[in-house]
Amino acid sequence: MLEIRNLSQYYGEFCALKDISFDLGENEILGIIGQNGAGKTTLINSITGLGGRPSGTVRLDGTDILGKRPDTIARLGVARTFQNLRIFRGMTVREHLLVAQNRKLSPGRKLLPNFRNTEDAGVDALLEFFDILRFRDDDAEGLSYGDRRRVEMARALAGSPKLLILDEPGAGMNEQESEVLASQIREIRERFHTAIILIEHDMSIIRACCERIIVLDHGQKIAEGSFEQIAADREVQRAYLGEEDA
Amino acid sequence: MNVYYTGLFVTFLINVLCALSVYVILKSGQISVGNAGFMAVGGYVAGILSTVYGLGIPASVAAGSAAAALCGAVVGIPALRLKGTYLVIGTISFTAMIRSIAQVLDITGGAMGLKGMKRIGILWIVIFAVLVIALLFLFEKTRYGLDVEAVAADSEAAAAAGVRVILIKVLSFTLGAAIAGIAGGCYAHWTQYIEPSDFSTSVSTMMVLPVILGGRNRIAGAVLGAAVFTILPELLRFASVWRMVIYGVLVIAIVIVKPDGLISGRKRHA
Ligand SMILES: Nc1ncnc2c1ncn2[C@@H]1O[C@H](COP(=O)(O)OP(=O)(O)OP(=O)(O)O)[C@@H](O)[C@H]1O
Ligand SMILES: [Mg+2]
């Protein structure tokens, strides 16, 4: 469904991404790992139309999306979360999901004023899934770090994306929470029929979720394969030397 | 009602329209210090239509609003590329441009101003104000209203969630300009005389202050701000020359004590 060819991104002289190519299949969970500054976030920013002037090709179900506006890309079915949380200030958890849901509504429906707190099965089910239903009508900004991460994931899913991109969803979560997260990510695929790109430093989550993993180092793809293949790769070991127990 | 209170009431209604015209734009996370320009477009177009072309006053005001809305869309598009101070300067320049055009054209009466308008009935001003408040209230309850808030909160995150940020921003500018246009049309047909200096940058600024003071998150805030800015100058009449000083100090004090305005906090979406 996603086809990336020779994707590069320069910031002035600095090359943040160099000739990245890979494919992603329907319903696949692809892991992207790499050390701090390797270019993981830059890669998904390029895919989602945020920041920089990337070159190369990015095709979503055959449609060229590179260089398109972020809202256009989102409306084509690509949703994402942000590594450094981007919560809508002052808005409730429920409203976060309604905003993302909007893309599926007709302009006529969007112009219909709504006065009652109408039950919305879709929103509630998502909140229930992430175990944040009790915060539904609370200000999202006031939630704990982990819960705000969950709000971001729920918001991303509320738009029924074909492709969900998660940028370090496990950051700041403890071991137990990470375990829950890993099973949630696998369940997301089954329940919402979406392909997933998962950026994560926590190898237990990567190992539990991803059939395939891409390793980035200094903006370049240095390896691609299953967890075992990656772990055995010389170059990956060199890039991670002394830091990774995998 | 005696003439004094009638006049004060009309001033209040026009101030409400002016404040709401700014409110709508602020709500989308943008700022305009050029709404006097949109007001001028509404005032001149309505005034010319009713005097030269003999159109009815309410219809002229509506047409003036439409013309202002068009200008709003035209200004709103380049405004997308401007942020903060640059947007302030950009919108100020727009007003200056409108004033210069009104200065040089014959049909606007040049520096002599436009006169000959018949007086608009107060009821019409009430109708326009109530209509604008009601429509804004309804708009905020729609999913578009929610989009506007998301764009103001974080336009990149909103875009990533599929909100058409450009559409929402231009729409907000257009709507704000349309409301300023109504204010201009009503003003022109109430005072029955307008001249370019009626629409100076200080007028634009005076349109922003009530919203900041009253609370930029709520329609009620803009209305309250407009009320304060209508009554305060009257209450301070005794202070003559010191009026503007007291005025300024009061406004600064309120903004320091209540940075989100007198009516803060936003309404939730059902
Ligand atoms: N807007 C920018 N301008 C200049 N350089 C940038 C910009 N954004 C990112 N970079 C640089 O690009 C490189 C890759 O950054 P990126 O955020 O993609 O890394 P990352 O792999 O996501 O790291 P982390 O694990 O810390 O999130 C870094 O060296 C960073 O300093
Ligand atoms: Mg990153």
Image (cartoon, coloured by chain):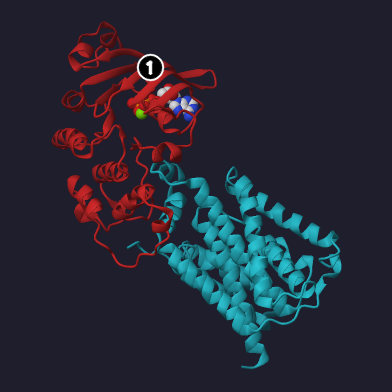
Chain colours: A red, B cyan
Q: Is residue B80 left or right of residue A58?
A: right
Residue at which label 1 appears: A21
Disc 1 within 8 angstroms of ligand 1 (CB)? no
Q: Quadrant of residue B173?
A: bottom right
- Of residues B259 and B70, the one nearer the viewer is B70
Residue at 28% across / 64% down in the picture? A117
Q: Is residue B10 left or right of residue A63?
A: right
B20 is higher (above) or lower (below) than B166: below
Crowdedness of circle 1 by 10 Å Cα count: few (<14), some, many (20+)? some
A52 is higher (above) or lower (below) than A94: above
In the picture as drawn, the residue positioned furthest to the top comes out as A234
Q: Quadrant of residue B269?
A: bottom left
Q: Quadrant for the C terminus of chain B, please.
A: bottom left
Tell me which amino acid carries mark 1: Ser
* Residue A37 visible (yes or no): no
Q: Secondary structure at mark 1?
A: strand
Find residue A18 and report its horizontal and vertical position in percent: 44, 16
B230 is higher (above) or lower (below) than A189: below
Total tally of numbered discs in the picture? 1
* Residue A66 visible (yes or no): yes
Residue at 41% across / 30% down in the picture? A45
Residue at 22% across / 49% down in the picture? A127
Find residue B261 and report its horizontal and vertical position in percent: 48, 65
Find residue A190 and report its horizontal and vertical position in percent: 18, 35
A201 is higher (above) or lower (below) than A21: below
Q: Is residue B185 left or right of residue A60?
A: right
Residue at 41% across / 33% down in the picture? A48
Q: Quadrant for the N terminus of chain B, please.
A: bottom right
Find residue A108 and report its horizontal and vertical position in percent: 42, 57
In the image, ligand 1 is in what quadrant?
top left
Q: Chain of mark 1?
A: A
